[in-house]
Image (tube, rainbow, N blue to C red):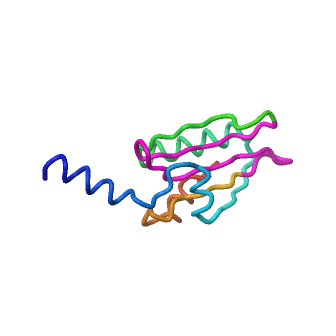
Amino acid sequence: MNAKAVAALTLLLLTGCATTPPELVQEAKAQTYTSKQEPEFAAGCMARNLENKYGFVVIVRRLDKAGAYQVIVRSGPGFLLAYSVVEPQDSGSKATLWVSTHIRDHEQLAATTAKGC
C-alpha cells in the first residue's frame, strides 16, 4: 500500500473521533473511580498503568490550584483515547474518566486505567 493510501485510510479511521478533552467529554460516558491516594499520585498511577500495558502517550498535568490533575491519553498526534480529571476528595481522590467509544474494548481500557490506583 502506498503512502497516499495509508494516509487516506488513517484519515477515514480517525474521522469523527474526539481530538480534544471537551469533545471526548461530550462523546463518552463518564466513569468515576475513588482512590485513597492524593490526586497527583492517583493520576501518576493511572498514567503508568496505560504506559506499561499499552504503550500509549500519557500526559499528566496539574489542572488547578485546588489540587486537581488531568490525565490525557493519546495513541498519537490528533487522536485522543481517554481523558481523566482527578480531584481531591476527603480521604484521597476521585477520578472521572472518559474513554473514546471508538475503542473496541473501551470498558476494559477504563478498568485497566484505574486498577490499583
Q: Dominant secondary structure of the magenta stretch?
A: strand
Q: Quadrant of residue 61?
A: top right
Residue 111 x %, y %: 56, 60
Left/right of residue 35 with respect to residue 7 in the rendered view: right
Residue 70 to residue 11: above or below: above
Residue 26 x %, y %: 62, 61
Left/right of residue 96 with respect to residue 11 in the rendered view: right
Residue 45 x %, y %: 60, 42
Q: Residue at x 58, y 63 (%)?
A: 28
Residue sitting farthest toward the right? 90
Q: Residue at x 54, y 52 (%)?
A: 82
- Figure disc tally: 0
Q: Quadrant of residue 63?
A: top right
Front one among 42 and 22? 22
Q: Is residue 87 magenta?
A: yes
Q: Quadrant of residue 92?
A: top right
Residue 24 to residue 61: above or below: below
Front one among 9 and 60? 9
Residue 32 x %, y %: 69, 59
Q: Is residue 9 magenta?
A: no
Residue sitting farthest toward the left? 1
Residue 62 to residue 115: above or below: above
- Image: magenta residue range: 66-94
